[in-house]
Image: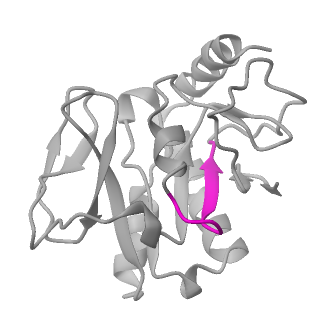
Amino acid sequence: MTKADLRRTALARRMALDAGEVARRSDKLRESLFRQFPVADWQWLHLFLPLQKRNEPNTWEVIRWVWGEDLPLQLAVPVVQPDGESLRHCELRPDTQLTHNRWGIEEPVPDPVTAPEVLPAVLDAVLVPLLAVDRTGQRVGYGGGFYDRFLAQCRPGTQFIGLNLLNEPPIRRIADVLATDVPLTAYITPGRVWRF
């Protein structure tokens, strides 16, 4: 299947989930992340803030857990740049002021004290949004290429972990993978973890 086909069908299935189911499945993703990955060994975790109108996984579950457990893990989140094509990354702290970008996604107001810039080279792991994934770790997102450009800037060994609210295994193959697409190293659904 092509990315466009997968994007359309997966988004429709995800949009059919009610708010309670999104919350329940998001909690399962959080549990799997902390149970199946060496989070305590990481210094920096990058994650996306959820776009609720598209029923994205609620990564605030992960954020609240890190802050509530007082883990030494530092968090970073993306900020879309004015060019509409690139991302900058800022630290997320409890006192970080947030605003909504033009897509309705929360992101930090860049500030040298409460939301300093974080370079991709320092990240130990990145939680990656997606709609579908194949058996080689290639993913389908919304089609903007933001994450492929970003992941290519990370250092070798950074864990790229896809999150999906749908309990779907990787498909056999995405038909139109590009040379610039960056594969995941792992994929979490509410029911299972796959590693590539």
Q: Residue at x 52, y 22 (%)?
A: 143
- Image vertical order of residue 163 relative to residue 39, above or below: above
Percent position of residue 155, x then y: 55, 65
Q: Which residue is drawn at 68% across and 76% down?
A: 35
Position of the C terminus, as image quadrant, is bottom right
Q: Residue at x 70, y 45 (%)?
A: 183
Count of residue discs: 0
Percent position of residue 191, x then y: 77, 52
Camera-side residue of 104 and 110: 110
Q: Can residue 28 be seen in this view?
A: no
Left or right: 75 as drawn, with respect to 10? left
User: Can you name the residue that lies furthest to the right here?
Assistant: 172
Left or right: 15 as drawn, with respect to 1? left
Percent position of residue 98, x then y: 15, 52
Q: In which quarter of the image is residue 118?
A: bottom left
Q: Is residue 118 visible?
A: yes
Q: Which colour scheme is used?
A: one colour
Position of the N terminus, as image quadrant, is top right
- Image vertical order of residue 90 relative to residue 114, above or below: above
Task: Let me know if residue 61 is in the magenta part.
Answer: no
- Image vertical order of residue 31 relative to residue 28, above or below: below
- Image vertical order of residue 9 relative to residue 189, above or below: above
Left or right: 59 as drawn, with respect to 84? right
Q: Which residue is drawn at 23% across and 38% down?
A: 81
Camera-side residue of 94 and 24: 94
Percent position of residue 84, x then y: 28, 27
Q: Quadrant of residue 117?
A: bottom left
- In the image, the segment drawn in magenta is 154-164
Task: Let me know if residue 163 is in the magenta part.
Answer: yes
